[in-house]
Image (tube, rainbow, N blue to C red):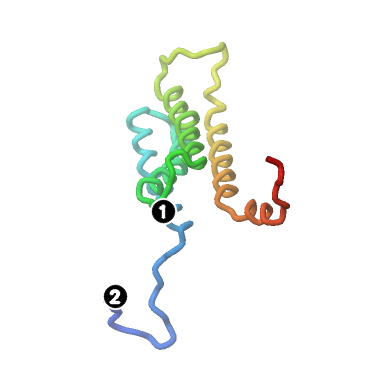
Amino acid sequence: MAIDAIYPIRIPGIKAPAQARSSLARRLTVILGLACVLVPIQLLLFDLPVYQALPIAALLGLTGQQFVQFAFGRGQDLFEPINMVAGYFALYFAIRAIYVLGWTGVPRLGFFYYDDYIPAALWCACLGYVAFTAGYRSGFARRILRRLPESTAS
């Protein structure tokens, strides 16, 4: 037996609001939730300026939604390419940026300080991750593969 929401007053011609079933809406909710939690943590713990904390939180939110989906999803492989790429982007770009920007006394390789370029690089990493996930989840490649002839070489 299904339990529906009860609306005490129903106006004719207006339907009850439907629940959001879009996976895009769920993903955006998780991304924004993670980013909203991570920005204050970075501001308080690592004393980062807002222009540096926002791209880090955005990238961690983007990659974190994949880990949340993996944790609560069924039938996903840990070594699926999307999980590996999310881990790479989270560790290499976001955690490394927190390490470099959050601690002033870290030893650096090279002679040049590149703190000015890190926020721009993180925004580019966000775009790169979004482009990868959009391509990975689209059916465009499957449509192309259906049109190609099968290989007979063994």
Look at label 1 and name its amino acid: Thr
Q: Which residue is drawn at 40% across and 46% down?
A: 70
The residue identified by callout 2 is: 2
Q: In this view, does 124 lie to the left or right of 71?
A: right
The relative height of residue 126 versus residue 114 in the rendered view (above or below) is below
Q: Residue 50 bears which disc, if any?
A: none
Q: Which residue is drawn at 37% across and 28% down?
A: 47
Q: Residue at x 28, y 78 (%)?
A: 6
> Residue 83, position in %: x, y?
47, 40
> Residue 68, position in %: x, y?
38, 46
Q: Which residue is drawn at 51% across and 37% down?
A: 85
The residue identified by callout 1 is: 29
The relative height of residue 16 versus residue 105 in the rendered view (above or below) is below
- Quadrant where the image shows the C terminus: top right
**For residue 64, what is the image quadrant?**
top left
How far apart, in angstroms, are the residues tagged by discs 2 and 1?
26 Å
Look at label 2 and name its amino acid: Ala
- Foreground pick, 26 / 48: 26
Q: What element carries label 2?
A: loop
Q: Looking at the image, is mark 2 or mark 1 nearer the viewer?
A: 2
